[in-house]
Amino acid sequence: MKTRFVLAFAALVLAAGSVLAQAPPLTVPDASPAATVSQTIGITNVTISYHRPAVNKREVWGKLVPYGQVWRAGANMNTTITFSSPVTLGGKQIPAGTYGLHTIPTDKDWTIILSANYNNWGSFSYDEKQDVLRFPATPRPADFEERLEYRFENLGEDSATAVLHWEKLEVPFPIQVDTKAVTFASLKNELYGLNQFFWQSWNNAAGWCVRNDYQLDQALAWADKSISMQKTFPNLRTKAAILEKKGDTKQADELRAQALGLATEADVNNLGYQLLQQKKTDEAIAMFRKNVKDHPNSWNCYDSLGEGLEAKGDKKGAIENYSKALSMVTDETNKKRISDILARLKST
C-alpha cells in the first residue's frame, strides 16, 4: 500500500513538472510590432500587413538588408498585401486575394515580388516558382524613419501609390484599379441578393451607370426593372437620363413630364437643389415655384424658393419668401437660420 502511494505521488510530481514545462508564453512587446494599413480605391480595399523593424543605429541598406537577396519587406512573417478586387501592378492584372510581398533591393532599382505563398516566415522558404508577379520599382531619398512603415499616397478614383519607407529611403509602387468595371460587377452581384426585391436598388444601380456613362444598355434594363416594380419620380427620371444619353431626347422629355406628375414635395425640392448645383438657376426656381403652388402650407417650399431667388440675385423676392417661411416655421433652429439670412439680406 505504501509503495503504491509513493508511486502515485511521484507520478503527480512528474505531471506537474510536465505542465510547468509547457506553460503558455506570456505577452510582451514585440521588437518589431505588427501593423496594418488599408486604403480603399473606388470600392476596392487594399491592405498591407507587416511588422515594423527599427533602425536601432544600424546600417540598413546593403548591410542589415543585403542587396541582391530576397527580403520579406518587413520583419517576422513575410509582409502580405490583400486586394478585394482585381488590380493591376507592373502592367499585369492580378486577381483578388492575399499575396506574400517580397522585394529584392539593390543600390539602384528594386524588384517587387508577389508570391502565391503568403504564409512564409521571412523569406527563408521563399520559392521563385510561386511568384505571381515581379516588377521593378525605383527607390528615392526620404526623411529619416526609425521604424519601417507602409502608407498610401496619390489616391485617385482608379489608383493609389503604395510606399515602403524606412531609414532614409522610400520605395513607391503604383496600384491601378478598373473602378468602373469593379463597381459594375459588384452591383450585378448585389442585385442577386435581397436588393432584388426593392425598386430603389435597381434604380440606384441604373443611376450609377448613367452618372458614369457606363454600360447604358444594362442601365436601361435595370431602370425598366425598377419601373415594373413601382413607377416613381426617381426611376422615370433615371430612365429619361439614360435615353437622353442614347440620343432619344423626345422620349426622355416625355418621361420627365410623366415623372413630375408622380413627384412628392421632397422629390421636387431635391430636383431644385440639383439644378442649383448645376448652375441651372432658372430651372431650379421653376421647380421651387411649382412646389410653392402645390404645397402652399409648407414653410420649406418658401425657404427653398427664397434660396433660389437669392442665388439669382433677386434680393426682394428672396426676402419675401424667406419672410413667409419664417412666419410658418416652428422649430427654433430653422427660425434662427432664416432670421440670420433675412438680417444679412436686409443689411446689404
Image (spheres, helix red, strand yellow):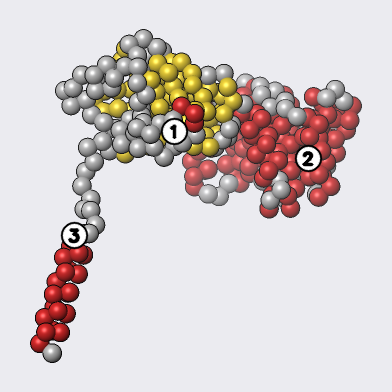
The label on residue 100 is 1
> Is residue 151 something one can see in this rendering?
no
> Is residue 20 something one can see in this rendering?
yes
Counting labels gives: 3
On-image quarter of the N terminus: bottom left
Residue closest to the eye, 305 or 228: 228
What residue is pinned by disc 3? 21
Q: Which comes sooner in the sequence, label 1 or label 2? A: 1
143 displayed left or right of 126 = left
Please, what is the three-letter code of the amino acid marked with disc 1?
Gly
Helix, strand or loop status at disc 1: strand
Q: Is residue 262 above or below residue 245?
A: below
User: What is the crowding at mark 2: few (fewer than 14 residues within 10 Å), some, or many (at least 20)?
Assistant: many
What residue is pinned by disc 2? 222
144 displayed left or right of 311 = left
Query: Cα distance, mark 3 to mark 1?
Result: 35 Å
